Every structure is written in structure tokens, then in C-alpha cells.
Image (cartoon, helix red, strand yellow):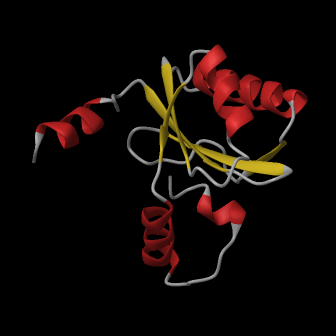
Amino acid sequence: MNSTQNKKIEQVKETTMIVGIDVGSEKHYFRAFSWRGIELTGKPVAFSNSMEGFNSFYNSVVELMQKNELKEALVGIEPTGHYWFDLGQFMGEKNIKFVMVNPHHVHKTKELDDNSPSKNDRKESSCY
């Protein structure tokens, strides 16, 4: 493994919650997981592409972290068009660490997980 891969892997610790967001034009979906891949949300959670929706997302993330005794969140998003810009700015202002995920990798991971080429925003949020 090269040093870049090691740096990426080292970002995830036992105290890290991993959050995957599927970005849409009007609605986003997120799912949260422990560092071991255990889903913490139970199902995809929708929030609107607005300040109200971003605050709802933030409050949900904070609540999940407290409930599961986690100290930080690492958010993965697929940069879909320009729809992620406002969300990215919001996360930056809230000091939420986020990373961009290659759309090709998301597509391939989803296919491997469920053996289906269909596109489904709710399902894709677990692939980030």
C-alpha cells in the first residue's frame, strides 16, 4: 500500500462515524455507519437541499454520534453536478470533515453489494 492509501485508511478510527450522502437536486439521502460497517441509521434518511434541511442533517449526525458515543464524523459525498456546493459549504462552516467519492466507484460498489445495475438514491448512500 502506498502512503496516500494509508493516510485515507488512518482517517477512520474506532471513534469515527462514517456518513454517506447521495446528493440530489432537491433532496439528499444519508446513511451512517460505525467504523466496522454497522449501520446506525436503520434506513436512509432524507433531508432537503436547503438551510433547513442541512440543519436537520447536522442535528441528526450530532444525535447519532452522541447516542453511539462517537467523537467525529467523516462524510463521503458523490459530487453530483453543482448540487453539492451548498452542502459542502455548510459542512465546511460546521467543521465536518468530508471527502469526495468517485461516481464510478460508487456505481461499482453498489453493483457488487446487491448485484443490480439499477440506480436508487436511497441505496447509493450506503456506498460512499
Query: Residue 118 at x, y = what percent?
Result: 63, 82
The correct choice, above or below, for 61 with respect to 94 in the image is below
Kindly identify the residue that appears in the image at 60 percent across and 20 percent down. 92
Find residue 62 and report its image quarter: top right
**Total count of labels:** 0
Query: Residue 83 at x, y = what percent?
Result: 73, 47
In the displayed structure image, the side of residue 6 where residue 96 appears, left or right: right
The residue at the far left in this view is: 1
The correct choice, above or below, for 123 with respect to 69 in the image is below
In the displayed structure image, the side of residue 43 where residue 49 appears, left or right: right
Query: Residue 126 at x, y = what percent?
Result: 56, 56
34 or 104, which is in the foreground? 104
Query: Residue 113 at x, y = what percent?
Result: 46, 72
Find residue 2 and report its image quarter: top left
Kindly identify the residue that appears in the image at 40 percent across and 38 percent down. 35
Find residue 123 and report its image quarter: bottom right
The residue at the far front in this view is: 82
The correct choice, above or below, for 78 with respect to 84 in the image is below
In the displayed structure image, the side of residue 48 where residue 10 appears, left or right: left
Kindly identify the residue that appears in the image at 66 percent across and 44 percent down. 41
